[in-house]
Image (spheres, rainbow, N blue to C red):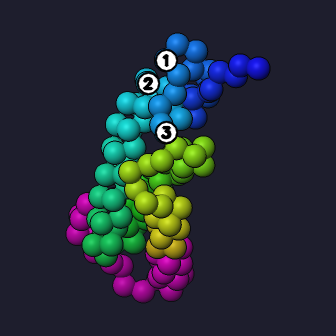
Amino acid sequence: MFAVPSCKACRRPALLFGVNRDGMCPLCASLVRVETIARVRIAADAMRTARQTTNPKARLKKIDVAIRNLKALKVYADRGIPLVVPSVSDLLHQALQLRRATASKAGRKHLRKTQEEPNRGHA
Ligand SMILES: [Zn+2]
């Protein structure tokens, strides 16, 4: 029986050109590479800014940007597509941890209603 391999990214049978080493059709191979690099960069920048930001609200916003992009990358990783980053799950775990820590700190601050942190407009 002859089975046509399907692309791991678009999941369509790769009838004409087959799939590459990473299991993707030629179109997905180039699109996924470009998208992956962009998302990794955005996530890394967002996490860096988040760590430098003292304002909890601004920090949460940046962490959410990182989480959104890492989750999109994880979809590919879960389909067995090799990505340029070693472990998206680890990065996502770190981002979620920082988010929880920041959110609980911000929540406590809000409840106590102590002095407001000045928004110095980082980010
Ligand atoms: Zn494809």
Helix, strand or loop at label 1? It is loop
Q: Is residue 107 magenta?
A: yes
Q: To which residue does mark 1 refer?
A: 17
Q: Can residue 99 be spotted in the picture?
A: no
Q: To which residue does mark 3 refer?
A: 22
Q: To which residue does mark 2 refer?
A: 26
Q: How many residues crowd mark 1 within 10 Å: few (<14), some (14–19), many (20+)?
A: few
- Cα–Cα gap, marks 3 and 2: 10 Å
- Considering the image in quadrants, where does the C terminus appear? bottom left
Which amino acid type is marked by label 2?
Answer: Pro
Q: Is residue 69 left or right of residue 23?
A: left
Q: Is residue 4 above or below residue 98?
A: above
Q: Is residue 11 above or below residue 88?
A: above
Q: Which residues are magenta?
A: 100-123
Q: Does the numbered disc 2 mark a residue whose Cβ is under 8 Å from ligand 1?
A: no
Contact flag, marks 1 and 2 (Cβ < 8 Å): yes
Between discs 1 and 3, the one toward the N terminus: 1
Q: Is residue 15 above or below residue 11?
A: above
Which amino acid type is marked by label 1?
Answer: Phe
